[in-house]
Image: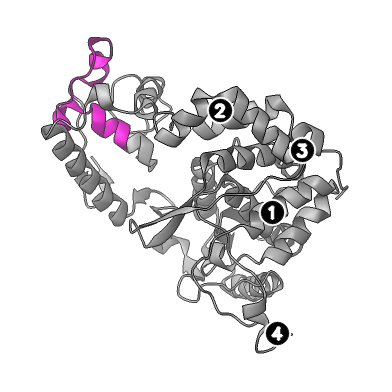
Amino acid sequence: MKRLGNLWPELISFPNLLRAACRAAAGKRTRPDVAAFLLDLEPQLVKLQRELRDESYTPGPYRCFPIRDPKPRLISAAPFRDRVVHHALTQVLEPVFEKSFSKDSFACRKGFGTHRALARAKEGARRCRYVLKCDVRKYFPSIDHAILKDLLARAVKCRPTLELAARIIDASNAQEEVLSYFPGDDLFTPFERRRGLPLGNQTSQFFANVYLDPLDQAVNRQMRPTIYARYVDDFVLFGDSHARLAELRASIEDELCRLRLDMHPGKSRVYRTADGFTFLGWRIFPERTRLVRGNVVRFRRRMRSLAAEYARGAAGWDRSSGARRRSIPEFERGLLTRTTGIPGGCGSKSLNSSRSGMVAHALACRGELQFAVPASEARLWTGVSLSFRKGRAV
């Protein structure tokens, strides 16, 4: 890969910082820290630009909070001015790496996403008899800082840009402890190497794609399965030979070892596609796809929570977020897939697993929550209802 330089002037330019601030504030403008920054936007961006130019910029402390749905995770929220810098950096670096990223990597990339990843997996289920489903054990806490910086330096030779990326990586807060030994390690090596990226950063999503790109290249150029799809640390390989896929698993473990990563022993195995397999919250079969039961339970729990909020006056159309409101025109255009019979031309039989789409539907489903929808939108929701039976939308 040809290394690119002279990225710094574009990175610290005022238009790039302004675009980064707008992207970082999307859907969060009413939050106090975001509103305070936007109230004084131009002076704040000029100050940030000056700090970046004279290399005095220092990331601030993270605000951490746990989530337990669907499993326990620690979310780290950076100060808003740091999130502006994260977006400014990725806006410059993404075009550099996008040219070399595999077409089979679907996470956090414009024009890709979960729907295309699921479509790829469905194609594999229809065409092949077996699937090797793999999962990286504790991926984000295991990302090695030195290896990540080396991967960035293979494509970028702009010193200030690499130093800013290194500053953000080094400022990562402590993550869940992962103790793993790899060939060549001594007793103290796992404790001497810094690991872990915070969940919640824009840069963490991008760096996660960079870190596993060598695996994508090895799979596509050397292993060559019939079909391959990866979404962050979940990936599937399809083929018609069980023995061949078992061999590929050993090769993948070797590639992950070079990145100081472990494959999850309980979530990585070969399945018959006819028996179905789970990928991105869906149970995929050759002829059909079903929503995983856990997602149905969480959705219904969220519906009950929204109903309770509405009953006590804490939720309603006038208090719903802009993201939820914007989802409704998408319903009309058929961009958010729902069950058959939804007004506005949605004819898909699948149920969108996007949480924002679900919440938008929950907010506007008159039959479920009885929200007061403006007259201009009421025609879209008359008679709409949503129920579940054994994991399927009916």
Nearest to N terminus: mark 4 or mark 1: 1
Residue for badge 4: 185
Tell me if residue 46 can be seen. Answer: yes
Q: Is residue 12 above or below residue 283?
A: above
Give the camera-side residue of 74 and 63.
Answer: 63
Label drawn at residue 199: none
Q: Which residue is mark 1?
A: 167
* Residue 283: x %, y % from top left: 38, 55
Q: Amino acid at mark 3?
A: Arg
Find numbered disc 4 in the image and state the secondary structure of the residue it sits on. loop
Mark 1 or mark 2, which has the lower sequence index? 2
Q: Between 351 and 254, which is closer to the camera in this rendering?
A: 254
Residue bearing the label numbered 2: 22
- Identify the main secondary structure in magenta: helix
Q: How far is disc 2 from disc 3 in space, using C-alphas?
A: 21 Å
CB within 8 Å, label 3 to label 1: no
Say which quadrant the C terminus sits in.
top left
Q: Earlier in the sequence, mark 3 or mark 1?
A: 3
* Amino acid type, label 4: Asp
Q: Residue at x 69, y 49 (%)?
A: 102
Res 31 quadrant in image: top left
Residue 290 x, y percent position in the rendering: 34, 50
* Disc with the residue nearer the chain's start (4 vs 3): 3
Q: Nearer the viewer, residue 70 or 231?
A: 70
Q: Residue at x 58, y 68 (%)?
A: 142
Q: Which residues are magenta?
A: 359-383
Q: Nearer the viewer, mark 3 or mark 1?
A: 3
Where disc 1 sits, the SS reads helix
